[in-house]
Amino acid sequence: MLDRGKLHKYVVALVRGNEATRRDVIAALRNHEEREWMEAPAGECNALVVALKQQLKAEAAQPLVLKNIAAILGNIGPRSKSAIPQLIQLLEPGVAEPVREAAAAALGKFGKDARGAVDRLVELAQGGNSLATQAIRALGRIGCADARVRNVLTTLWKGPMQSPVSHLHIAIAICRLGIEADNAVGYVAHHLLNNPESSLRQAAAAALACCGKKTIDVVPALLTAVLSDKDDNVRKSAQAALDQLKLSIDSAVTICAKQLKESTFAETALRKAGQRAVPALIEALDGDDEARLKAARTLAYLGEAAAKAAPALAKALRDKDCNIRLSAAKCLWNITKQSDAVVPTLVRLLEEKNAIKTDDPEVRRQFLQTVMEALWRIGPPARAALPALQNKLKDPNRLIRESAQDAIRKIAT
């Protein structure tokens, strides 16, 4: 804990101590995290910032010390904004690379107060190295999206492939600044759900909150992270993003259902939401064909938890689209375990010559095998389907014949 007494001792040691003492104090200060500085007393904090600024001048030849001081000033945050000019100076050529990186990272934490660093950061962002990555991160956090920044970030995004980490930070900065760039939002959403580094997932969540709740993939990715990420800090970051967008879990579910057709992540989000997603999925059954198909598939995944969807699914058994009929039948069985309505629909899908409107033999094979799989999963209650399955034993496609034989064996036992 950074109380008045401890901070006062730090200040006295920096002002009056010898070189070794000052280095020890700076190393100790470097171990305190941002949250600790938020709770530290303001007066002593201000005195410490003054002492640290003096050390930036006194220790100019000591890269490790400069690096640590830059990091400390960044962790202190807005209370140390008087040091912004000194931190900008640390970005200049000739300063050791690790020091420049620490200075760029610190400047990003001051937000709009660090706008004076933008010109230098724009230059550094094009270097293609770790310093460039820190400069890109800082640009995103400072929040200046003028023509200079937009041009450099969109050029980097469209240009030759960066390192995966750098490429992600470019996309995060683009999202934070509200810059339009093809697939940047989807790229950040993907990393929120799949990147192994929790710190990068947290950064992705914060960036998505800047994109607006109507932007495709934003809410589905955030909701999925809130409901399923294994890291508590990532879940909190995603929840904070939904809060920033003024969305409850239920309103986020509604948006996910409306994005079923366009979003890569909406179906997963609705599965994670479980029973509370059922009303929105029922409504989606009256939408676009692709959305209806995904809605039925999601309801099937939810099983008995989606019992309230049974009437809407029964209606979908008469849909003109064979894939929706198939999904509805599978879903109804998962929910109700009642074969009377389901099996006749599956039989008709086997018997109708034009059920699936395609000349592609591979698509036909996959569809018929899926129907037969649905029947054998029902088991003996699907005995009414045996004649239709026996007819498929004569099908010219060997795989269809084998699937029919397998389904007959499992149903007849």
Image (cartoon, rainbow, N blue to C red):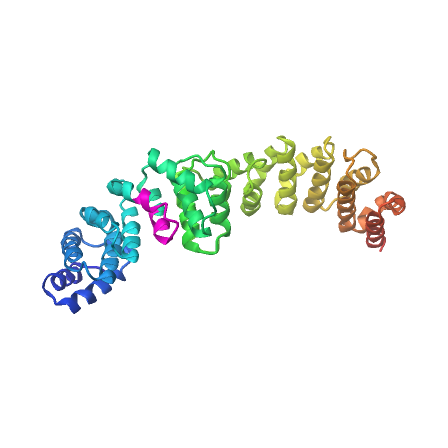
Image-based side of 17 in relation to 231, left or right: left
* Quadrant of the frame with the C terminus: bottom right
Question: Residue at image x 14%, y 53%?
Answer: 50
- Residue 264 horizontal/vertical position (percent): 56, 41
Residue nearest the viewer, comparing 310 with 12: 12
Q: Is residue 209 visible?
A: no
Question: Residue at image x 70%, y 34%?
Answer: 316
Residue nearest the viewer, comparing 62 with 29: 62
Question: Residue at image x 18%, y 47%?
Answer: 82
Stretch in magenta = 121-135
Magenta segment includes 133: yes
Magenta segment includes 172: no
Image-based side of 152 in relation to 251, left or right: left
Q: Which residue lies furthest to the bottom in this view?
A: 20
Q: Is residue 367 visible?
A: yes
Residue nearest the viewer, comparing 307 with 205: 205
Give the overall secondary structure of the magenta segment: helix
Image-based side of 407 in relation to 18, left or right: right
- Residue 57 horizontal/vertical position (percent): 15, 56
- Residue 385 horizontal/vertical position (percent): 84, 44
Q: Residue furthest front?
A: 94
* Quadrant of the frame with the N terminus: bottom left
Residue nearest the viewer, comparing 239 with 129: 129
